Amino acid sequence: MTERRLFSRVAYRAPAVITCHETTVTCQVIDMSLHGICTSKPEMDFAVDPSELVQISVNIPDSNIQLLMDAMLVSFDDSHLRFEIQQIDLESITYLKRMVELNIGDESLLHRELEHLSHIQAEDQ
């Protein structure tokens, strides 16, 4: 199968909290990119409507950094939930960009991903 990813994933294990309406569940981050996040499926029954935004909070261990984002469910299986980031605050995207930069080790690839991300956002507006 041909790899079609436009964004580099960073394998990262950290606790996450997903909030949808009045329901809050905890899970683990599996990986993240500038465009999305994959988490473990929460142990409690949690139904997410793919047309609704959820809030995801990721606490970075051994720091006071918290990534905050609004995302939409794009796919799931028996053990994973995959979300597309719809909105993320400046501090969170700055930290996420740095994580990706350190993990891919190729500044030109990072700039290409940022350019592609800005095109996606422009198309959505």
Image: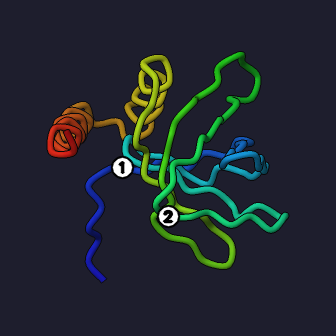
* Residue occupying the point 43% across, 52% down: 84
Mark 1: few/some/many CA within 10 Å (<14, 14-19, 20+): some
Q: Which mark is residue 33?
A: none
Q: Is residue 20 left or right of residue 119?
A: right
Q: Residue at x 76, y 22 (%)?
A: 62
Which is closer to the viewer, label 2 or label 1?
2
User: Position of 104 compared to 73: left or right?
Assistant: left
User: Compared to 41, does 23 lie above or below?
Assistant: above
Q: Identify the amino acid type marked 2.
A: Pro
For mark 2, give the secondary structure: loop
**Within 10 angstroms of label 2, few (less than 14), some, or many (20 or more) residues?**
few
Disc 2/disc 1 C-alpha distance (Å)? 23 Å
Quarter of the picture containing the C terminus is top left
Q: Which residue is mark 1?
A: 8
Residue 40 position within the rendered picture, expressed as x and y whole percent measured from the top left: 69, 61
Q: Is residue 64 left or right of residue 99?
A: right
Q: Residue at x 83, y 64 (%)?
A: 43
Instruction: From the top left corner, tell me how far across and down residue 117 is, in percent.
Output: 24, 40
Location of mark 2 (residue): 50
Tell me the amino acid under the disc marked 1. Answer: Ser
Residue 55: image location, x then y, percent:
60, 41
Residue extending furthest toward the right? 44
Q: Quadrant of residue 87?
A: top left
Q: Does residue 55 sit above or below 26 in this rendering?
A: above
Q: Position of residue 8 (x, y in %)?
A: 36, 49
Q: Secondary structure at mark 1?
A: loop
Name the residue at 66% across, 49% down: 20
